[in-house]
Image: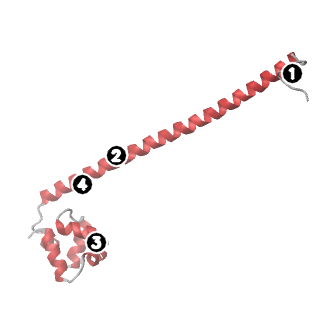
Amino acid sequence: MKFNEKLLKLRKEKGLSQEELGMEMQVSRQTVSKWETGQSYPDFTRLVMLSDFFDMALDELVKDVDVQEVRESSFTNEKIDSIYRVSQDMDSVFQNKTLKYAIKGIKWFIVGSCIFLCLVVIISLILHFIYPESNIFWRGY
């Protein structure tokens, strides 16, 4: 009998729902469901907890488990998780760079605008002192 079938049988013999067993093992109902359908396997700590909970030896609980299948499944899940983490990290890096460039651009725009405004005022003052009678640069009311 495979591990997932054995777990399902043991849980039903105790009259527990997946949610109740999940609470005992400190995992979600969905995790117990994945164990029972063979989509995933419990980690070592949970295996020990299960063997204690069902009052059986650990080797008795996992006797017919295909270790190679567990390794392949774990490797695939770890690989998928690592790819997902890398893509999330890259997204955050690009978002941070974009944000940094946007802030830098805004800063330079403000600095450039201030410099331009100062130059206009200075040139206007200089022209006013050179041509004091002209009303083009400064109007006297």
Q: Which residue is mark 4?
A: 77
Residue bearing the label numbered 1: 135
Give the amino acid at mark 1. Asn
In the visual, does 53 lie left or right of 62? right
Which of disc 4 and disc 1 is earlier in sequence?
4
| Badge 1: residue crowd in 10 Å (few <14, some 14–19, many ≥20) | few
The reply to whether dot 2 and dot 3 touch (C-beta < 8 Å) is no
Q: Sequence-wise, which precedes: disc 4 or disc 2?
A: 4
Looking at the image, residue 137 sits to the left or right of residue 70; the answer is: right
Q: Earlier in the sequence, mark 3 or mark 1?
A: 3
The numbered dot on residue 86 is 2
User: Residue 63, image x and y in percent?
Assistant: 11, 69
In the image, residue 24 lies at what x, y percent?
29, 77
The residues tagged by marks 3 and 1 sit, at their Cα atoms, a distance apart of 84 Å
Disc 4 residue crowd, few under 14, some 14–19, many 20+, Cα 10 Å: few
Is 99 drawn above or below residue 72 in the view shown? above
Asked if residue 55 can be seen in this view, the reply is no
Dot 4 and dot 3 residues touching (CB under 8 Å): no
Pointers 1 and 4 in contact (C-beta within 8 Å): no
Give the amino acid type for the residue marked by disc 2 in the picture.
Answer: Val
Tell me the SS state at disc 2.
helix
Asked if disc 3 and disc 1 are in contact, CB closer than 8 Å, the reply is no
